[in-house]
Image (tube, rainbow, N blue to C red):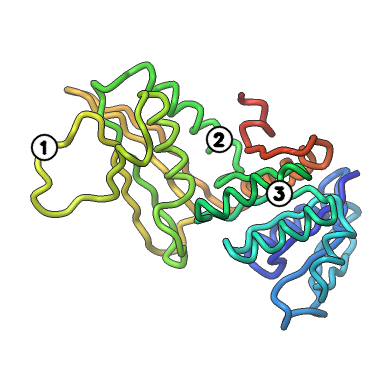
Amino acid sequence: MVSICVAGALGRMGHRILELAAETENTTIGGAFDMPQFAGRELQVINREGMPQTITIGADVASEIAQADVLIDFTNADSCIDNVRAASQARRSAVVGVTGLSESQVEELQDRSRDTAIVYAPNMSLGVNLLFKLTEEVARLLGLAYNVEITEIHHNQKKDSPSGTAVRLAEQAAHGLGLEYPAEAVFGREGLVGARPERQIGIHALRGGDVVGEHTVAFIGAGERIELTHKAHSRDNFARGALRAAHFAASASPGLYDMQDVLGLR
């Protein structure tokens, strides 16, 4: 049995993780918290027996985390780092799905992972993680004869651009091609940019409506184009992936992992 604590419990992802956790085998909810002004608020979820379960938003972050085995965090870059610090101090594992972390923040996750297991992934869906692997393999097979262009679409409330998933796709493509990221990347194009360099990887972000997430990697050659696309229809695949990652982290040795480790795709 794995007990989870959810940060940002009142957000869209946090709330959905709690709902799915309540109905998932071998999973219990040990804690939940959000911004301080929401302490004491109650959420209702339905458990495995079909009965309502009340979850109270905690007031003390450290206490909520200490009551669980694993912290799951989909909040924001700054809050996430504070929460992971609290988790590592309590010797609790952590699952981090926050995107837009700075280089120094990622380094802090690496430092904290010396004491506890941390799963850090920009996207926790099985399909997207297969897309990561396929992108690298196709890039390696096709080589520089095919130009790589990545397009991502998200809802109009998403704060960071490009998405963490698009960045990871670019990294995978670069690795397959033997290129450096972000040195060979271009983020959109405007004006008289001239001919496209052979080694360039294009990344383009679209925002609008309520799109959960869509990513396409296009390999464009002479006379043909290959496209790999993933479309998320709901947040459930991300939430289920986070729960799967929590079960992995609960029994993993200290270290920094990603969903490729969780899913056995290495």
The residue that disc 3 covers is 112
Residue 36 image offset from top left, x and y in percent: 73, 79
Q: Residue furthest top?
A: 141
Badge 3 density bin: few <14, some 14–19, many ≥20, Cα 10 Å: many
Residue 30 image offset from top left, x and y in percent: 87, 59
Residue shown at the point (62%, 48%) measured from the top left: 238
Q: Nearer the viewer, mark 1 or mark 3?
A: 3
Describe the element under mark 3 as helix, strand or loop.
Answer: helix
Q: Is residue 112 above or below residue 53?
A: above
- Is there a contact, CB below 8 Å, between mark 2 and mark 1? no
Residue 244 image offset from top left, x and y in percent: 73, 41
Please report whichever mark, 3 or 2, sits nearer to the chain's N-terminal start: 3
The residue that disc 2 covers is 129
The circle on residue 195 is 1
- Is there a contact, CB below 8 Å, between mark 3 and mark 2? no
Q: Is residue 216 above or below residue 37?
A: above
